Amino acid sequence: MKSNSWKPWALLAPSLSAVFFLLVIPVCFIIVYSFWLRAPSGADIPAFQFGNYAKFFEDFFYPKILIRTIRISFETVFLCLVMGYIPAYYFYRSESRYKKIFLLLIMLPFWVSFIIRTMSWINIMGDSGLINHFLLKIGLIESPISMLYNEFTVLMGLIMYLLPFMVLNIYVSLEGIDKSLLEAARCMGCTEWQAFREVTLPLSLPGVSAGCLLVFVLTAGTYLPPMILGGPGNDMIANLIFKRVIGTLDWPFGSAISVILLSLLFVIVWTYNRYLGINQIFKSLQGN
Amino acid sequence: MKQFSPGWTLIRIYTILVYVFLFAPIVVVIVLAFNPKQFGIFPMEGVSWRWFIKLAQNESIIDAFKNSLVLGSLTAVISTGIGILAALAFIRFEFPGKNTLNTLLLSPIMIPEVVLGVALLLFLRFLQQPKSFALLLIGHVVLTLPYVLLIVQARLVGIKKEYEEAAKSLGANAFQTFREVTFPLLLPAILAGALFAFTISFDDITATLFWATAQNQTVPVKIFSMLRNSISPEINALGAVMIVLTVTTPLLAGYLSRKFSKIKD
């Protein structure tokens, strides 16, 4: 067996070098750049100073966006959980012959571009969109209500994007529960509700927490829904990065904000992994 | 479970409502793509193909489509190729640091695409290279590799090592064993992984928006830049074409693979 020891490394070489050169090193570059200076001319000057971080925390403007990002991420997690658990439970318990089709359908949004799913809310909630059209038609309102470009529509866009992740995570975890445990609980005299509360719910928690983590991480790092469905006051931290890097070409400050976002996510993922273990997340993504 | 109890009925209605929520925006895009009028959204004023015809005549959109298709296909080939090799290493060999390396290769899933977009662009800037098609390609390979790896690994775990050992004991070398035994058994996962990589690449917007240029646009980037004005039937039509393409491909592939496996039985 000893002579084989080089083989796995040869097999791993292409993917490891891809991830090393295209992910690890570039991320190190972000960290290095975040200490650099930006000359008034727009040139980047190598330096080691904390000015970019100081700028972020110097007044309330940027920290407020950071706090908003965390708040919106928690709201999205909560809403996805509320909207996602029951459908996942339905798939698990359903004996319908259409169950497979239902499951396939929940994956369909994964195959539709994020930009399409986001912009389509304008079709639905715009001034001449579906909801206004319907309300006008039944005579409930006289003139269209403007519903777009606020935190509510941003949340709609985010849920649309993340709900399937939550449903799948919970479903995978539910599907792993031995159904005879439920029968046992019922035999011992539990009601349906008690059996759910005492057996199914606790055993589905790994999937619930994995889904929550995934939704949180993906929400905190996205800029598309605030950009397309939000107003000026709904920017999240990823929007800041986009504006700094693509808009004003302020690389050092953009890098510093990226490092702040990465650190936030690192703390959350690390804490999660410490207490719950990260592997559950990858388990549910395999099924896709 | 009593499938007719009132509680169950509520669960069912709730599930259906969630589906309506998830599918309304998608269905509406497709319906509105056939709306002949130029301004506003609803009401529909008949059904027409005019926006699709206009799309087909728009050269920059055709270019974006070609770009997306080539990019998606190349991404799928490269990502699946190196993903298979890595999966073989992780499932068929024991070596130090295995778990850490596996987590490292899967980590792009947990790193926000914004950060990935900035990081790669910054690296390119340091190397003083302009944005190009190659940047999009390597970026998309990093984005898709973890998903391919997950899918192929999951399948490889299920293929018994004994088959490969039997082939080897009958005199096949490592490559022959892979070609004649492992590869055919792995094929469904390889196709699924490649298809998934293609769709992720074809649909991606978050990181791609950092890497694309006016010369190297993909369809989602094109939609994004068209949205700058306002939503229009033309955008809906473009969206509808994308939906039909990215949704029917996996469904068709799934259907065909089931059909072929039935013939074999």
Image (spheres, coloured by chain):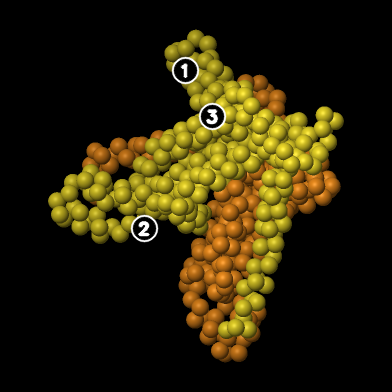
Mark 3 packing: few (<14 Cα in 10 Å), some, or many (20+)?
Answer: some
Find residue A24 and report its horizontal and vertical position in percent: 67, 54
SS for callout 2: loop
SS for callout 3: helix
Would residue B49 be visible to someone looking at this image? Answer: no
Image quadrant holding the N terminus of chain A, namely bottom right
Which residue is the site of mark 3? A68
Q: Which of A172 and A134 is in front in this view?
A: A172
User: Where residue A1 is drawn, which disc sits there?
Assistant: none
Above or below residue B91? Residue A48 is above
- What amino acid is at disc 2? Gly
Above or below residue B76? Residue A123 is above
Q: Which of marks 3 and 1 is nearer the N terminus?
A: 3
Which residue is the site of mark 1? A135
Find residue B151 and report its horizontal and vertical position in percent: 54, 61
Say which residue appears at 26% left-offset and 45% top-offset.
A197
| Chain the render paints yellow | A
